Amino acid sequence: MKITMIYGNSLQGVSYHYGEMLLSKFPKGTIVERFDANDLPSFCLSCKNCILKGENRCVEAKKTQTVFASMLSSDLIVFSYPVYALNVPASVKSLLDHLCYAWMVHRPNEDMFKKKIIILTNSVGMAFQQKLAIKSVRIAMNWMGASYVRAFPVGMMGDVIWGSIKDDSVKKLDESASRAFGWYERNKDKERMKAGTKFKFFVCKKMHQSIYESSTEVSLDNQRFLDKKWIKAKKRPMSD
Ligand SMILES: Cc1cc2nc3c(=O)[nH]c(=O)nc-3n(C[C@H](O)[C@H](O)[C@H](O)COP(=O)(O)O)c2cc1C
């Protein structure tokens, strides 16, 4: 079994320890690839090369593709990050931005369809304010085709300095990590794409079929859908 762990910062603080608590629940021999904020790609330059010319034409391709290759070869992908300004930290958002080309509207990778995703979030305030921070990652994973995405938010209620953290707060994080582990154990063998994701993929296939049939050139996105036989290769009215 392999896990990709993506930390939203590079501090050995709450997010790091919360993530490590979850990892400690898995059996010995589990392969873990860790990435922190320093390993994540810098901001997208909006060149659109990833979408139009190929993902390796991005100036941040080395970092992005290293993380994505790890994600694709893992059974479980974990994000562990603090809430910033009621949202996801820019480090994680930047990774998500660089992976837009792999959304179902562009060139999804079918290896993502069966992935289990755990989102561990924490904030100085209460957990209910973490909705937006969770939603950003949940939506991105879902549009990349992953149906099994679950968040485990913890509100630290002011106790966020790891060096002086109270035992009760550590216990709270560990209990939440145990719940996350339990969720994975219950869902690890599930492979069927859930209805909502299936519907999105269905709409994307229809969209790609229509674009393919009405354009003179086959885009990279269309080519992937053709290669995977997600759309039908038909004679197009404008191609002769
Ligand atoms: C720039 C910044 C913005 C933050 N914004 C919020 C926020 O909107 N709401 C909140 O409850 N906590 C906020 N926090 C607190 C962090 O979520 C908190 O410090 C986190 O629990 C600590 O995790 P860490 O040790 O991994 O950094 C913010 C912290 C920083 C540094």
Image (cartoon, helix red, strand yellow):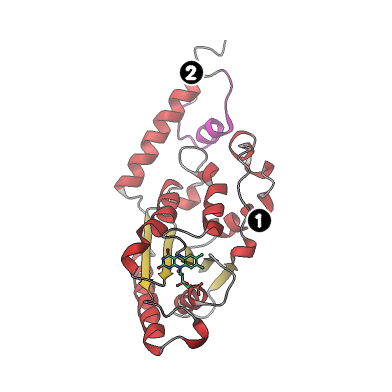
| Disc 1: which residue | 63
Q: Is the C-beta separation of discs 2 and 1 under 8 Å? A: no
Of 13 and 144, which appears nearest the observer?
13
| Residue drawn at (37%, 36%) of the image | 202
Residue 233, how many percent across, how many down?
50, 25
| Residue drawn at (47%, 52%) of the image | 112
Residue at disc 1, secondary structure = helix
Q: Does the magenta portion include 112?
A: no
- Residue type at the position of mark 1: Lys
Query: What's drawn in magenta, residue-wise?
Result: 216-232
- Residue type at the position of mark 2: Ser
| Residue drawn at (36%, 73%) of the image | 155
Q: Does the magenta portion include 220?
A: yes
Image height of 112 relative to 34, above or below: above
| Residue drawn at (48%, 47%) of the image | 110
Residue 52, how many percent across, how many down?
61, 33
Of 154 and 65, which appears nearest the observer?
154
Image height of 75 relative to 192, above or below: below
| Disc 2: which residue | 214
Residue 234 visible here: no
